[in-house]
Image (cartoon, helix red, strand yellow):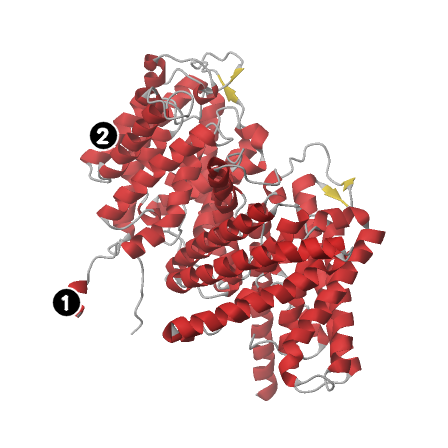
Amino acid sequence: MNEFNQGAPLRGILPENPLFRLALGVVPTLAVATTLINGAAIGIAVAFTLLCSNIVIALLRNVLPAKAHVLCWLIVICAFASVAQMLLQAFFHDPYQDLGIYVPLITLNCVILARAQMAEEEHGVFTSAGRSLVMGVLFALVAACVGALRELLDSGTLLGAQVFGKGFEPMLLLKLAPGGFLLTGILAGIANYFMTRSKKNDKNAQKGGAA
Amino acid sequence: MNGITSLGGALLYLAACVFTSNPVFTRFLGTAPYAGPGDVGKSAKLGLYVTSAMTLSSLLAWPVHQLLAQLSLGYLDAICFLLLAAGVVALLRLAVKSISPAGYAAMEGAWTLILVDSALLGVTLLNVWAQYDFLKSVLSGLFGGLGFTLAAVLLAGVRERLATSKIPASLKGLPITLISAGLISLAFLGFMGMAK
Amino acid sequence: MELRVSLAPHIRTADSTRRLMLDVLIALIPASLAGVYFFGPNALMLLVLSTASAVLAEYVWQKLMKLPVRVNDLSAAVTGLLLGLNLPPQAPWWIAVAGSVVAVILVKQLFGGIGDNFMNPALAARAVLLASWPVHMTVYTLPTMWSGADAVTSATVLSGHPAGTMDLFLGNIPGCIGEVSKLAILLGLAYLLIRKTITWHVPVIFLGVTALLAWAMGAQGGFTFDGDPLAAILSGGVLFGAVFMATDYSTSPMTAKGQVVFAIGCGVIVSIIRAYGKYPEGVTYAILLMNIASPLIDRFMRPRVYGSPLKEEKA
């Protein structure tokens, strides 16, 4: 987590892409992002949890004794994750069925994120909120994309509608566990590849500028 | 299917938890195998701790859940289990420290990893959602932990081997670990249909 | 000076790999010919396509990644042919291409190329194909003897198709292209043994354990000790797997003792899957699982480094 440096939010798209580069939310994405909707659903749940819990934690930070910090985070984050779960159950019942136990589990990913954030210098409530919102939204986008890709390849549909013609033979492996691992791993590799390329370009640009 | 009624049933359940529904390779639970040390010895120890934590958690979670259900406070499940898990991990940490200070020092960073590992909370929640009886819950924790240990050790063995391979730069680290896990998961498909 | 750390076998010039691979290709000729004879033009097309796709995939990858192009070490060709021989004879052409690409790129090149992959590429690709397009991968047909007649679908022997021992041996049965003719496979085995490409241990132990467990587990899978050991090793893909897949260097243990453990493990898992699992044949998964366990087996069987003390002396 040393490279976890929250600079401008744009860095979250590629260099600090939450899923592929920072290994956050691997479990929920692998398990749940099987369709576009499911990916979006878990992403939104994560964003919601991150945002709310970060606001609360930032507000409480000066009130709580230092030693109780981690415990309090756990409770707060878990509470909001449970709320997210109930909201999903009430308003988005279909995705809720698919997501199952993985919604409470996003607590754990949010805890990692919170720890990293708190390790840095003090921030106001608004900055914290802003950062977590950005992180959450980015994660949601990534999860939705992974879900969309999986849905396209393993069923030939997008949002439930047939996209490819009759000749398309869906790759059923992607419906199963191995498919999730393989697809996510390959996508992470691709993300890395573009990262290194952009880093190289940055370096070249700097050299050119300094010359 | 909510309880185990015989030794044969228990053995079958063991096979199911370790092979057919391996928590890491079939249910995606567990971040430590990817994020944690890619070292066989350490992974084995990690697995041992996780198994103990899981068994204890499952054991304690069952009465807690019964109580919450009685009070119609079911939605507090996750929070309570999380606190329970934190307590169990803290307890284990103390135990290991007093039994083997050297061993404790070697596994310094592991404790947070265990707590945050979705396998622990995941298995506990699964037991409750599937409404297992007490015995099955405890066994589920124990066997799930064994499955987790197997997964961690297998993955660590592969990662150790990969350390000397000429993996393309973009794939080093998380990507190739995920792909390896995917291939292992593929091989585990062979166990489908065994725990009838 | 840059030191390169790598895994055994260490003395590996392009030349020696090529010779090895050439021997394997030659050993595969009888099985290929038999498969094409029994199953006709579609089988031939699959074999040619799978081999060619594999070589092409490796060539393209190495060019794209700016690596030295090593396709003439023939390892990709071997992988391609092995994959083709593991396909059902009436599979569509794109299955062969997809399989070869997966084998060469996903399982082999992404991990670093020859010697660095930890799983048998052809088998892993077959598992991917089986899970992705199960219908195409499980439709088997009766042999047509190159007569041009339409293929008739049929269950395989392990799924209940009746077959006498001579049929099983010669190959006049439904199954994958390369696995049906045990005679052809044995010819290949003899060649490999004579050329010292492989040793007898892994194939013999693998088959032996399978036969033993088949006899012990009996006809109903309940340890009734009345099973048919000969039928067990002559049915399905176990002979092909034991000779050509379980003997792959980079995916099996390095020490002789380790290989024995490996072979026993394969035999045990095959028998378990055949008896209790949902698939009729377990060879693919058995070998893949033992591939995964190989680094661990190696770890436990590390030969003692000369000069280091034995445990008892440490006191």
- Mark 1 neighbour class, 10 Å CA radius: few under 14, some 14 to 19, many 20 or more: few
Disc 2 and disc 1 in contact, CB within 8 angstroms: no
Q: Earlier in the sequence, mark 2 or mark 1?
A: 2
Label 1: element kind: helix
Residue B126, given in percent of the width and then of the height, sits at 63, 50
Residue A126 is labelled as: none
Residue pointed to by mark 1: C313
Q: Residue flagged by tag 1: what amino acid is it? A: Glu
Q: Residue flagged by tag 2: what amino acid is it? A: Ala
Q: Is residue B142 above or below residue C285?
A: below
Residue A197, given in percent of the width and then of the height, sits at 57, 68
Q: In which quarter of the view is residue A187 placed?
A: bottom right
Residue pointed to by mark 2: C190
- Given the image, what chain letter belongs to the residue carrying mark 2? C
Residue A171, given in percent of the width and then of the height, sits at 61, 39
Query: Between residues A9 and B35, which one lies in front from this camera angle?
Result: B35
Label 2: element kind: helix
